[in-house]
Image: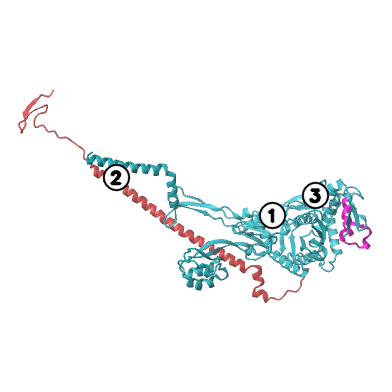
Chain colours: A cyan, B red
Amino acid sequence: MSRNKFLKFGVLAVMAVIVARLFFIQIVQHDYWVERAAAQQMMQYTLRAERGEIYMMDGDEPVAVVMNATVYTVIVDPMLTDPEEAKEKLTPILGEKRTAEWDDVFANRALRYYIVGKNVERKAAEQIAEAEVDGVWLQASTKRVYPEGDLAATLLGFVNADGVGQYGVEGALNGKLTGKDGILKTVKDVNNVALSIGDENVKVPAEDGDDVVLTVDRNLQHGVEKILTEQAEKLGYENISALVMNPNNGEILAMANVPGYDPADFGNVRSAADYVNHVVEDPYEPASVCKTFAFAAGMEYGVMTAESTFVNENVTYVDNWPIKNSTQRTDLLGTVNMQTALNWSLNTGSTQVLRWLGGSETDINAQGRERLYDYYHDRFGLGQATGIELFEATGIVYEPNASIYGIDSTYANMTFGQNMQVTMLQVAAAFASVINGGEFYTPTIVKGVLKDGEVVDTTPRKVVRRTVTQETSAAMREMLYNTRRAQRTNGVDKAGYHIGGKTGTAQVIKNGEYSFDETVATYIGFGGTEGELPQYLIMTRVWEDGKTAGGEAQALLVFNALNAYVQDYLKVKPAGV
Amino acid sequence: MRPQATYTTRRGTTMSTSWSRNQNTVRHKSKSLGTISNTMIVGMLVLIVGLIYVAQGTQATNYDYELSAIDDEIAELEARKEDLAVEKARLTSIAATENSEVANNMETASNSGFVTE
């Protein structure tokens, strides 16, 4: 073979190899290399939606109580950083934000990444940048800040390390607050600057979360929490919860639990129970405040008025089970009217209402149970979620024909708020309808959304249903007013105001039986100008594990303290002014 | 039909032709550039178009840099705005107001009532 031919074959062979290789790369591995090229030339960012802020009202002005702030993580490259310089310059700037001991940071100089500070605020970050320490850099991120500190912590909830809302408003309205992330996919240059050239660029802007405005009044909330803290110390109880509500539209003005916690340091609590908003998430037996509902049902069916009488023996038997009055005063024995029964919270009186509802003087029957259930469950909404914009428990109200042992005694107990589980909010919403003329409003905590400084997307407050007639409502208001006056409240309520309310003291089930050693105290009441519809509703609850608390002895006192403050804050005028 | 003519060339070759001797046989041919010239011109044109494209691309990239710088500035200003809003909220918080020097120097209000006109 001549050299020419050899050369030709050689060149052809080389060309064939090149063609084969190109075929392999361009055809067989096409997708792989396209992907590699795109990875080098394209950049893709998630455009983070900013979490919405949470506002409370301050009079007519919304004020931020949960906000976002840029914070920085301070990172050191131990290989490049001079230990002495870092210690000297960064220690005073980082202060409490320093998360590592310097000896640990520089123990292994081969490391290239060590976090020495977290949640460092802008001013400190700027000082760190100005210090110009080699091998130190800052990484920005966003965190929730709470300018009001621990105000309304159990109501607001917190945001966990993954950016997900937990408990309270943060948890229940997480979707509304989170918004929707966007995408930026574009060609980049060597400096990672997004270039507009290229025909595959994608930019979907992020949709920031809504700024939610609560119906809660910041000052009122602060005042209520302050009073609860004082009362908890004064009365010597660990837990107090309270709720202030506008009974004429269902708006929550304050919702507080003591003890609370610091949402900025949410890991630092005694137990997970501290996160719970007991007003909505913790069903309990509210006890005799429910007599309000039993008596209202009795009036609605025309079986009783405040003057109706029955024979009180301080004990009555249902299913051979004794139902006793908490007070065993002998001067109450004999014929008493229903106002007296409410004043002294006679369980025998409310049990008698159940009998009357069934058309009997002596027996509890299916008709009585069905009528009570109709009011308790279907009209007042007890044992059901109210529909408020928070996580809430439903509770239990047994159906009138439930297959449980002693359904009659269960229903007799329900007339004075035991053998049922409801939340404070359910009781408050029902109570509001009894005293406001008979209109049931869904309780609400959200006033609207803040846009360009204006509160918009406000939901009109609608009457969901009528629970009682205006006549029954007026009669119940009067009975509750008289009951409050009959209790130890002389001199507490100012003249010209119409303040009414009812106590409740519930035994707690321990080891399957009602305990005499632990009780929960409740008080629910209303207030307003005499001769007018109530302008506010307050409910209080006092309890502690292993301790007895009384509706009159403790919860009423908390109500009194709150009532004086709320009355002044809301500028409720006495009659004649 | 044109008459056949026989003549002897200067080299002594006898030739026969249908043309008359000494007749002008000028062949007109249009002038055109050569292959190399054509290639160069096309190359130049491609180069010019390429330069225009690159110039436009560079200009677009310059805008992209400006946009990027402005975006960074906006982000920085927004972060500062957020910080200031937080600082303002802290300063006007109830706790800060209650603990302020002004509040501490205020006298406790006595009970007051409503005035009837």
Check the residue under mark 3 and report the chain it is in.
A
Quadrant of res A552:
bottom right
- Disc 3 + disc 2, Cβ < 8 Å: no
Task: Describe the element under mark 1 as helix, strand or loop.
Answer: loop
**The N terminus of chain B sits in image quarter:** top left
The mark closer to the camera, 3 or 1, is 3
Q: Amino acid at mark 2?
A: Val
Q: Amino acid at mark 1?
A: Phe
Q: Which one is in front, A200 or A10?
A: A10
Task: List x then y, in percent, for residue A290.
Answer: 82, 56
Q: Please provide the residue range marked out in magenta.
A: A326-354
Mark 3, other Cα within 10 Å: few <14 / some 14–19 / many ≥20: many
Q: Is residue A467 above or below residue A124?
A: above
Quadrant of res A257:
bottom right
Mark 1, other Cα within 10 Å: few <14 / some 14–19 / many ≥20: some
Q: Which one is in front, A198 or A55?
A: A198
Q: Which one is in front, B7 or A530?
A: B7
The mark closer to the camera, 3 or 2, is 3
The span from disc 2 to disc 1 (Cα, nearest Å) is 74 Å
Q: Which residue is mark 3?
A: A398
Q: Which residue is mark 1?
A: A391
- Callout 2 and callout 1 share a chain: no
Q: Which residue is at a point 35% across and 50% down the rendered structure image? A: B52
Check the residue under mark 1 and report the chain it is in.
A
Check the residue under mark 2 and report the chain it is in.
B
Report if residue A407 is visible in the image.
yes
Q: Which residue is mark 2?
A: B42
